């Protein structure tokens, strides 16, 4: 099983600041990695797939990068609605696995 | 508009069985692989199972293999999860999720999610 580790666990920032979230895989997932956003009481929302492609309707302030074992989600300028939990997910091998999440709060 | 509506959750005793359903609309259900993902209270996301578009192949997390069965009825646009021998650690909100198809073939990420159905396992 591929284990995903996310850091930091919590990121405390202010609106307008840049957020940089990290996801590290226990073995190479090539670029088969996605990022999701989840707000309290809501289902997750797909933001980024294949490491760097934005999903339909996702604002350009969200960007993904990385390959192999190290990946980054960047939010260029935080909007109030971006304060949420963020998960990474790999599809390289079965079982599909998620990281433990990074909370972005004020 | 894509909609996924789960049902069938509810309090169940350890060792019991339950079947979850997910009614899909707004897309060609038979053309998409589908999955179940769960989230224990206050915890992260855990993939449970995926079934291919035809229903020919299914994949399971080790934690549910042999106890849970995923299936689908493409004539009814409905996804199912039969859960047997339930344990306290199966307590979670169970989401139905559509596998996305950017480009050709399924990319096993999830682009649409239902709101979930809660399954508490407790005596």
Image (cartoon, coloured by chain):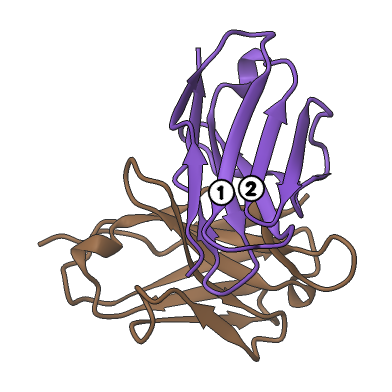
Chain colours: A purple, B brown
Q: Identify which residue, A95 or B104, lies in the foreground.
A: A95
What residue sits right under mark 2 in the picture? A70
Nearer the N terminus, badge 2 or badge 1? Answer: 1
Residue projecting furthest to the left: B123
Q: Which residue is mark 1?
A: A24
Q: Please, is residue A25 above or below residue B78 in the view?
A: above
The reply to whether label 2 and label 1 mark residues of one chain is: yes
Marker disc for residue A47: none
Task: Say above or below: B69 vs A99.
Answer: below
Residue B59 pos. (x, y %): 54, 80
- Left or right: residue A103 versus residue B27 is left
Estimate how packed mark 2 is, as few (under 14), some (14 to 19) or many (20 or more) residues with alpha carbons within 10 Å: many
Mark 2 element type: strand
Q: Quadrant of residue B56?
A: bottom right
Q: Position of residue A30 (x, y in %)?
A: 72, 62
User: From where the camera sits, is residue B4 visible?
Assistant: yes
Residue drawn at x 64%, y 86% as measured from the top left: B55
A98 vs A29, nearest the viewer: A29
Residue A53: x, y in percent? 82, 47
Q: Residue at x 82, y 37 (%)?
A: A57
Q: Is residue B77 above or below residue A39?
A: below
Seen in the image, is B46 located left or right of residue B17?
A: right
Dot 2 falls on which chain?
A: A
> In the shown orientation, is residue B86 left or right of residue B26?
left
> In the image as oriented, which residue stretches furthest toward the bottom?
B56
| Residue drawn at (20%, 62%) of the image | B88
Q: Chain of mark 1?
A: A
Q: Residue furthest right?
A: B103
Q: Are marks 2 and 1 in contact (CB under 8 Å)?
A: yes
What distance separates the C-alpha of mark 2 from that of mark 1?
Answer: 5 Å
SS for dot 1: strand
Quadrant of the drawing holding the C terminus of chain B? bottom left
């Amino acid at each position: 099983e591929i284990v995903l580790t996310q850091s930091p666990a919590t990121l405390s920032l202010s609106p307008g600041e840049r957020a940089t979230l990290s996801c590290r895989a226990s073995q190479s997932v090539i670029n088969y990695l996605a990022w999701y956003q989840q707000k309290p009481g809501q289902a997750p929302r797909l933001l980024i797939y294949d490491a760097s492609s934005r999903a339909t309707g996702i604002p350009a302030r969200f960007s993904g990068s990385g390959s192999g074992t190290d990946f980054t989600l960047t939010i260029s300028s935080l909007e109030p609605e971006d304060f949420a939990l963020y998960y990474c997910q790999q599809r390289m091998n079965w079982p599909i696995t998620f990281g433990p999440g990074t909370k972005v709060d004020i | 508009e894509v909609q996924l509506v789960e049902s069938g959750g509810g309090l169940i005793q350890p060792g019991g069985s339950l079947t979850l359903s997910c009614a899909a609309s707004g897309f060609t259900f038979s053309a998409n692989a589908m999955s179940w993902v769960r989230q224990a209270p206050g915890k992260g996301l855990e993939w449970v199972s995926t079934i291919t578009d035809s229903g020919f192949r299914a994949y399971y997390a080790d934690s549910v293999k042999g106890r849970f069965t995923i299936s689908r009825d493409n004539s009814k646009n409905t996804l199912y999860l039969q859960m047997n021998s339930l344990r306290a650690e199966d307590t979670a909100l169970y989401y139905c999720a559509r596998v996305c198809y950017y480009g050709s073939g399924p990319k096993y990420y999830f682009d649409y999610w239902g709101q979930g159905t809660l399954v508490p396992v407790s005596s």
